[in-house]
Image: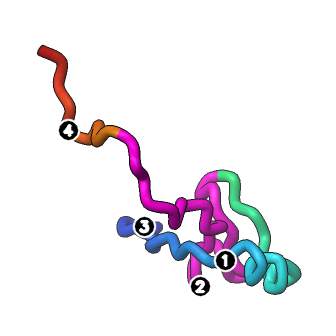
């Protein structure tokens, strides 16, 4: 059994739609893997849902309550 997780690669949703026939969804990984061999080798892909827009709100990371 693998001790180091394979890194997730984020790809464009349109590209994911094109390569979907070669992939299956793995519930345990919450990502797509190659059909047949994806349980041991190959990429672990997720749809890129990260925002590309600049955030103009208040910075809340590392904020603490007084």
CB atoms at circles 3 and 4 under 8 Å apart? no
Tell me which label, 1 or 3, sits earlier in the chain. Answer: 3
Earlier sequence position, callout 3 versus callout 4: 3
Residue where numbered disc 3 is placed: 5
Q: Distance between the residues labelled 2 and 1?
A: 18 Å
Distance of label 1 from label 4 (alpha carbons): 30 Å
Q: What is the residue that sits farthest to the right in this orientation?
A: 21
Q: Where is residue 23 in the image (x, y as percent from the top left)?
A: 78, 77
Q: In which quarter of the image is the C terminus?
A: top left
Q: What stretch is highlighted in magenta?
A: 28-57
The disc, 1 or 4, on the residue closer to the chain's N-terminal end is 1
Out of 35 and 19, give the one closest to the viewer: 19
Q: Residue 61 carries which label?
A: none
Q: Give the left or right position of residue 48, taking residue 7 as reference.
A: right
Residue 47 visible within the image: yes
Answer left or right for 48 relative to 27: left
C-alpha distance separating marks 3 and 4: 27 Å
Residue at numbered disc 2: 42
The residue lying at 51 percent from left, 66 percent from top is: 52
The answer to which quarter of the image holds residue 37 is bottom right
Give me the disc on residue 12: 1
């Amino acid at each position: 059994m693998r001790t180091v997780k394979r890194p997730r690669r984020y790809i464009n949703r349109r590209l994911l739609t094109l390569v979907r026939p070669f992939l299956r969804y793995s519930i345990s990984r919450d990502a797509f893997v190659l059909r047949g061999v994806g349980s041991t080798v190959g990429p672990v892909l997720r749809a890129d849902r990260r925002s590309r827009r600049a955030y103009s709100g208040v910075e809340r990371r590392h904020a603490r309550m007084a």
